[in-house]
Amino acid sequence: MIRVMVVDDSAVVRQVVQEVLRQHPDISVIATASDPIFALAQMQKNWPDVLLLDVEMPRMDGITFLKQIMQQRPTPTVICSSLTEKGAQITMEALEAGAVSIITKPQIGVGGFLRDNEDELAGAIRAAAAANPRRLNVKLATPKLTADAIMSAPRPSAAMARTTDRFVAIGVSTGGTQALEYVLPALPRTAPGLVIVQHMPERFTSSFAARLNSLSQIEVKEAATGDRIHTGRALIAPGGRHTLVKRNGAQYVVEVIDGPLVSRHRPSVDVLFRSVAKSAGPNALGIIMTGMGDDGARGLKEMFDAGARTLGQDEASCVVFGMPKEAVRHGGVQELLGLDKIPNAIVAYGR
């Protein structure tokens, strides 16, 4: 049983979350609180496995509260934030402070939204419960479609034209914001180009990319169709759309497209990795990092079969070892590395 505490100043949110989670026998809402002050008092009596936390609240904001919790007793936390520009910026601070993932909510009709997205809410809580709390603050029923929904599988016998361009494709989910905030700032300007899928809702990826750009020597930006993958640049796939890699002469560019959920995600790591297998073959390095589920496992195997170098983040340094574990099970990972070894591996590949 996953024990959840809901901390939100909206009585509607507290009531509806309790209502929808009653439908999931493995999840129990043990308490609710209208602000962090009340929440702290309740938590001393009965500490939850997962916090569902709003960020804008009276008396104490969610960021301050989260930082206190992470110092006192690291607890997997799902942020429930509004789909506003201000909300996106604040949520980035929450992810930096150690939150596991984000559930977005509209400013109007939040009750109906939570009911309609019951499975997403329950899935986020399960993913948080599976997280390794020791890694959270380290500064280092949708149809499950496959990548076939976006493009056909690569041909194993397809020869790849010569090019000097080589790049890195990364797939990451739960715990990935912290992991990327460790990896990207550690890269020099001479690092190979990167294209990254981090599971994140629409409107949040631009703020995340801007934050990484401010921390890093390399350029980091939200990907747009036609952007070239080149040395010293990382492209972050936009939330709510798929990102593919295409060959343009001797260069590689990205294409951002609409499409159905793949492996229950949009953007999907499987879609990115398959496009890399088809367009780049041995001219790419694939890395699958911390995350819940199996998105990217099949795509990384396709990259491996096409001649790419493939790596996975090891269990000891993952917040959730789900995605790398599944990639290993599918036979697509050549080597597992700790988070602290990944920047050097990227730089070495670029040489």
Image (tube, grey):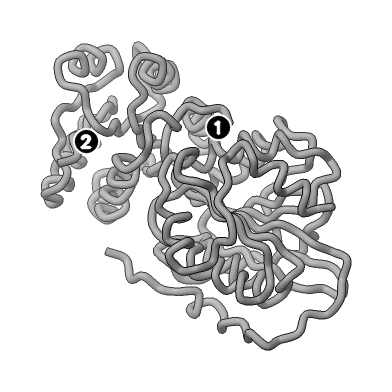
In the rendered image, residue 69, in percent from the top left (x then y), is placed at: 36, 18
Real-space Cα separation, disc 2 to disc 1, in angstroms: 24 Å
Above or below for 160 versus 272: below
Image-based side of 240 in relation to 180, left or right? left
In the rendered image, residue 114, in percent from the top left (x then y), is placed at: 27, 48
| Residue type beneath disc 2 | Val
In the picture of the structure, the residue carrying the numbered disc 2 is 12
Tell me the number on the disc at residue 59: none
Image-based side of 123 in relation to 171, left or right? left
Above or below for 178 versus 330: above
In the rendered image, residue 22, in percent from the top left (x then y), is placed at: 11, 46
Q: Residue at x 19, y 27 (%)?
A: 32
Instruction: Using the rendered image of the protein, determine whether residue 214 is visible from the camera's viewpoint.
Output: yes
| Residue type beneath disc 1 | Gln
Q: Are marks 2 and 1 in contact (CB under 8 Å)?
A: no
Q: Residue at x 11, y 49 (%)?
A: 25
Q: Residue at x 18, y 35 (%)?
A: 3
Element under label 1?
helix
In the picture of the structure, the residue carrying the numbered disc 1 is 89
Above or below for 118 versus 302: above
Q: In this view, which residue lies farthest toward the front? A: 335
Q: Nearer the viewer, residue 56 or 162?
A: 162
Picture quarter with the N terminus: top left
Q: Nearer the viewer, residue 202 or 65?
A: 65
Quadrant for residue 241, please give it: bottom right
Quadrant for residue 85, please give it: top right
Image-based side of 230 in relation to 342, left or right? right
Looking at the image, tell me whether mark 2 or mark 1 is earlier in sequence order.
2
Element under label 2?
helix
